[in-house]
Image (cartoon, grey):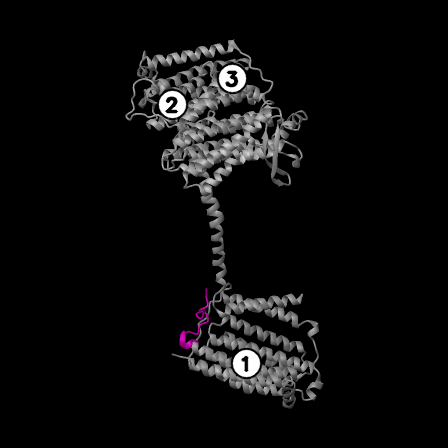
Amino acid sequence: MLEAVCFYAFAALMLIAALSVILNRQPIYSVLSLLVVMFCLAALFIMLGAYFVAALQVLLYAGAVLVLFLFVVMLLNLERETLARMRVFTLRGVGTAAAMCLLILLWKMLASPQAAARFTDAATARGHGSIEAVGRALFTTYLVPFELTSFLILAAIIGAVTLGKFHE
Amino acid sequence: MIPLTHYLLLSAVLLTIGLAGIMTRRNVLMILLCIELMFNAANLAFVAYARAWGDVSGQVAVVFIITVAAAEVTVGLAIAILLARQLRTLNADEVSLLKW
Amino acid sequence: MVACLSWTMLLAPLGAAALIWLIGLHRKRLSAALAITGLLLSFLCSAVIFFHVLAGEWLLPREVSVTWLSLPGLTIPFGILIDRLSLLMTLVVTGVGSAVFIYSLGYMAEDEGFTRYFGMLSFFAFSMLTIVLANNWVQLFMGWELVGFSSYVLIGHWYAKPAAAEAGKKAFIVNRVADVGFLLGIVALWAISSPVAAERTFHFQTLEHRLPVLITTGLIPIAMLPLIGLLIFCGPVGKSAQFPLHVWLPDAMEGPTPVSALIHAATMVAAGVYLLCRASWLFAALPSVLTIIMWVGGITAFLAACLALVEDDLKRILAYSTLSQLGYMVMALGLGGRTAGMYHLTTHAFFKALLFLAAGSVIHGTHEQQIWNLGGLWRSMRWTSLAFLIGGLALCGFPGLSGFFSKDAILVLAHEHMLPLYWLGTLTAGMTAFYIARAWFVAFTGPARHPHPAHESPPVMLGPLALLAALSIVAGYAGIPRLIDPHAHEAWHWHVAAAPLIVVMAGLLLAWLVYARKLVSARQLVHALALPYSFLKQRYYIDEFYAWYVAVVQQRLIAGSCAWIERRIIIGIAVNGTAYLARGLGQILRLWQTGKVQTYVLAFLIGVAWLLSASLR
């Protein structure tokens, strides 16, 4: 019962915030709406038993990435975005229509009876979402990708620094 | 007990919203933001399946996705700043130098 | 033995021509020697064959042949057919040709195109022999076209002169027009020669044997054969300059006189007559076509003689005279007289070549061609004048000379089968006598009107004249008709020969009175008959008509509309249109490249959606 209430509440909030992300004209408000989305997602992760991932979501994604976004938005002093003409045959109209179609398709796919699976409580009991479980998997099965991400981060750093210095 | 499909459908809706955002927003930074939204949708799907199948690999995937997203955002924002400086515009319609 | 002789006979002039072109273009003596040797070799071969046949050692007809082209459904041989007809013609061609070649040594001695002249003459000789010795239609047609080409080159020998170049073109084009019909006729004949495709043939003898069978078994549509006959007759109409395609022959006099003598008097123009003889088995079955042939010949003879009456150029008089005599020959063949036609062809070759060579001698000595600028040549150029006299008398059919007998043979036929043509031929004979006597009296007698003194020609030119004069005299007694047709009988027909004789004498007398005795002034005559005179002088306005036809109907109408179609439709729509289409498509397709990221995301999205929907089914 509680679970259902939590789920629907957080889901509703998430969707409203997501709509706000795409529909808001002020960039700052969009970023902050995304922040709300991420917090709701973290709540859902906790409901799904992935505690570590939820923490990561809040710390890394909301705390670092979005903050970075905020910094850039404030740095560039973005103006209020003007409303685009929303005629059907423009890019935007067609794009939105196509997205709707995709949604319908995905709904059809995912709502099919094969996808209906019951969550097992045993998974949570075994502490599947704990930091220990994730860490164990990360450092044994997925060691190589883990090490490779360090390269990725290094590349990103170098790229960002180079691009940042590239100005006349 | 919320069935898996609910989470998946939620993820799909989130994805679609992000997609619609990419199509409709004109600011390059906002497009990047909507991409982040789509990433999050994927994360939700992964975690949901991890819970459904009792496999922790889904959560490991999410860890990686977050990392990659961070790296990508870094570079993407650097490019956006460059755009703002060089072309003096962040309007996606005007950044069309590869036009015919 | 026969094969060896035959091939040498055909190919010797070709070898001479090739050698001249390869190594002899700078060496006058070598080229002349090669040309004369080549043709004399051919003459010797034909003489050898002739004597063997006369002695009864070799039976005719004989044939040697190789397969030139062999495709499924089409076989074309290349060979030599020796029968009485081709043997006689070969003797004439090579004999008269050799005389003309030797004459050219003197006539063209100062010409800078000496070597190419002889090369082309040798090539002409080969082409003519190809026609004469051909054993199938395709080879004959090949030779036909080649002589047309040789004629074009030789008429335009002095190519720097615009008139000569134009005349050469005219000759070739008019012949080409005729050859279209000719080729159609040949192919049609091939097509009907057998219902089985593989058995169709071009071969003369095979066709000759098959034709009666085909006719009786009704395998040929009734209307087809006369049409084929008419089409094939188109060839001689062009080559032998019958009306209305006679316009090229007078202009062909722009060429050197030996060329006129050989090609446009003795041999090439006679090829049409030869063809009619060769294909006489075909025409014998077509009485309607024969009627057309005889009337075309008769009309040509008459009209050409009229034109000769008003000509003042010595060579042109002789050209019209040739036209007229060719008309006689064609008329003879239309009347079914193969023998008479060939007889006249032979004698005509002799005396016409004689006349032309004599005229050439005059031109060589005085550099004058207009008869009113000449005169009194009897005193300064004795031998030439004598030659001209003999030739002229033979031409008008003076009793005793060769022309008399051959013309008589033709008129006998006309008298038997078509009386109007007999009277037409007689009248024409009278006119012939008049105009040739006119030429003689004006140019050779009377006071000398030319500025420079005339000198007689060198012996190298007089020798052939003497030979041809002798032949013109004795050819009537050599029994040529029996050579062509062993069963021919040369009976004497007084009642037929009387009228022409009287008319000829009257013509000679009239010319003597007008031009020698000056009983009636020539100028007064011209004034009195001004209208017909001017009409004849303009050559019936035929040339003007042809020029108008080409300029307006052909060029403006037909060629113009074709050009319009080509410009507007083919180029405008098909070619340029395709280009515009490609460009238009490109213009449309390039709109895909907007350069905007969101467009590409949209494309991506559509692709993903499509994939998903595909997997959903």
* Separation (CA) of disc 3 from disc 2: 24 Å
> Amino acid under label 2?
Thr
Q: Position of residue C164 (x, y in %)?
A: 38, 33
Q: Is residue C82 left or right of residue C108?
A: right
Q: Which residue is mark 1?
A: B69
Q: Which residue is mark 2?
A: C384
**Place of residue C98 in the rendered image (x, y in percent of width and height, measured from the top left):** 47, 30
Q: Chain of mark 2?
A: C
Chain containing the residue with disc 1: B
Q: x, y (%) of residue C66? A: 61, 37
Three-letter amino acid code of the residue under disc 3: Tyr
Q: Tell us which disc is closer to us: 2 or 1.
A: 2
Residue indicated by mark 3: C477
Q: CA distance from mark 3 to mark 1?
A: 123 Å
Q: Is residue C322 visible?
A: no
* Displayed quadrant of residue B90: bottom left
Tell me where the magenta segment starts and ends, as one range: B83-100
Q: Residue furthest bottom?
A: A132
Which residue is more in the foreground, C58 or A149?
C58
